[in-house]
Image (spheres, helix red, strand yellow):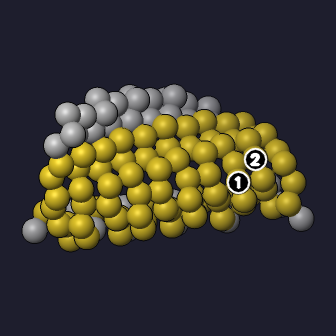
Amino acid sequence: MTTQETIKYNDGGIYSGATVNGIRNGFGKYFYPNGTRYEGQWRAGEKCGFGTVFYSNGSQYNGDWENDIKHGQGVFSLSNGTKLVGSWKKGKRHGLCEWIFPNGNKSVSTHVYGQEV
């Protein structure tokens, strides 16, 4: 049965959201001790589905997750306004990626498991 909980972890992290048997499952927010936070879907205690990470340095990632890593389509926004629109596979950029810079310029690149080709 799904319940709403707030759980404090020994490392200082805090989770607030849906759980099943005390495990993150469904929509929830996780606050990391370093100031980073994740808001989105969880399955069996891992980020899975759509979610957003707000990094403590001002950057953020909005996109798909699987097994606690970026996997699928997403947008990574740097704190300076630069955006990377593309896809990830097993946590690495994979496929066509488009950089969009604050001045409007764009650059396109192709990646295979994080390596530009």
Count of marks placed on residues: 2
Q: Please report the residue visible at 70 percent of the width from the left and 54 percent of the height from the top.
A: 27
Res 27 label: 1
Q: Position of residue 75 (x, y in %)?
A: 39, 52
Q: In this image, 54 relative to 96: left or right? A: right
SS for tag 1? strand
Q: Position of residue 77 (x, y in %)?
A: 36, 41
Label 1, residues with CA under 10 Å away: few <14, some 14-19, many ≥20: many
User: Can the viewer see residue 44?
Assistant: yes
Q: Please report the residue visible at 78 percent of the width from the left and 56 percent of the height from the top.
A: 19
Q: Amino acid at mark 1?
A: Phe
> Which picture quadrant has residue 31?
top right
Q: Position of residue 82 (x, y in %)?
A: 27, 38
Q: Position of residue 54 (x, y in %)?
A: 49, 37
Looking at the rendered image, the quarter that the N terminus falls into is: bottom right
Q: Amino acid at mark 2?
A: Gly
Q: Which residue lies under the disc numbered 2?
A: 17
Evaluate if marks 1 and 2 touch, with contact meaning CB atoms under 8 Å apart. Answer: yes
SS for tag 2? strand
